[in-house]
Image (tube, helix red, strand yellow):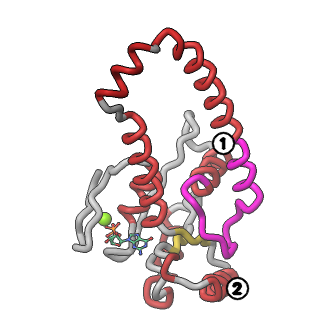
Amino acid sequence: MDARNPYFFYSADLEKYIKEVDAGKEFILCINKADYLSEELIKHWNKFFTDQGVKHFFCSALKEQQKLDKEEQAEDSSDYDSEEEEEEEKEFEPMFDELKKKIDIENELKEAGQEIVEEKKSEEILEFNTPTVFTRSQLMLILKQAAVKYERNPDNRLNIGTVGYPNVGKSSLINVLCGKKRVGVAAMPGKTKHF
Ligand SMILES: Nc1nc2c(ncn2[C@@H]2O[C@H](COP(=O)(O)OP(=O)(O)O)[C@@H](O)[C@H]2O)c(=O)[nH]1
Ligand SMILES: [Mg+2]
């Protein structure tokens, strides 16, 4: 739902209905567009839904998508070499080869280290019903943990569905989770039916 008006967007009936349809299904309220909320408001709504016993988390699909876009851009521009640079590179190629190998190995080690640190960092606060705005990697981790917990499919896959009013950011969330643009995002309602 859209964080700007939880009284309007939250449907207790939907939660009840989902539990009636299948006791094995879990209802988790995604409070999206948390970038519109101040820290106080996040704390307020966190308390409100915790008191009502509604499992929930905060996120900003837009902010996470912007981060993904930036990473993609950075990757694209680092691949780009000017012609002059390419010529120079050819000249010194044998000398650079060894150095490059070393740097590659160092970078790989660094990246692996960073991933571990990031996972550890997010593990510390990985709980629903907290006034934390989840990043993409935190969301991925919490979903992975849920997949292990349920073990409903032989290959441990978790099926997730989104239900909500138009324009609350369902498609944006799906795209962020997939890490790729899978579904169209638009200010016009009714864009996604299947993907
Ligand atoms: N500020 C803000 N805008 C968002 C966020 N998520 C989605 N939007 C915007 O809300 C609009 C509707 O998003 P969309 O994903 O198409 O919603 P859907 O109809 O529920 O699938 C788009 O203009 C998005 O860019 C968010 O976290 N913060
Ligand atoms: Mg949509």
Percent x, y for residue 52? 66, 84
> Would you say 110 lies left or right of 97 here?
right
Q: Which residue was labeled with disc 2?
A: 51
**What SS does tag 1 mark?**
helix
Q: Nearer the viewer, residue 186 or 65?
A: 65
Residue beneath the point at 33% across and 74% down: 167
Q: Is residue 82 magenta?
A: no
Residue beneath the point at 68% across and 30% down: 109
Q: Which residue was labeled with disc 1?
A: 115
Specify which label sits upstream in the sequence, 2 or 1. 2
Q: Nearer the viewer, residue 1 or 76?
A: 76
> Would you say 177 lies left or right of 125 here?
left
Q: Amino acid at mark 2?
A: Asp
Q: Is residue 135 magenta?
A: yes
Q: Amino acid at mark 1?
A: Glu
Percent x, y for residue 132? 65, 71
Residue 169, picture quadrant: bottom left
Disc 2 to disc 1, how far (Cα)?
35 Å
**Residue 57 marker:** none
Boundaries of the magenta span:
114-137
Residue 187, picture quadrant: bottom left
Q: Residues within 10 Å of mark 1 (few under 14, many from 20)?
A: few
Percent x, y for residue 68? 45, 52
| Ligand 1 rendered quadrant | bottom left
Q: Is residue 133 above or below residue 88?
A: below
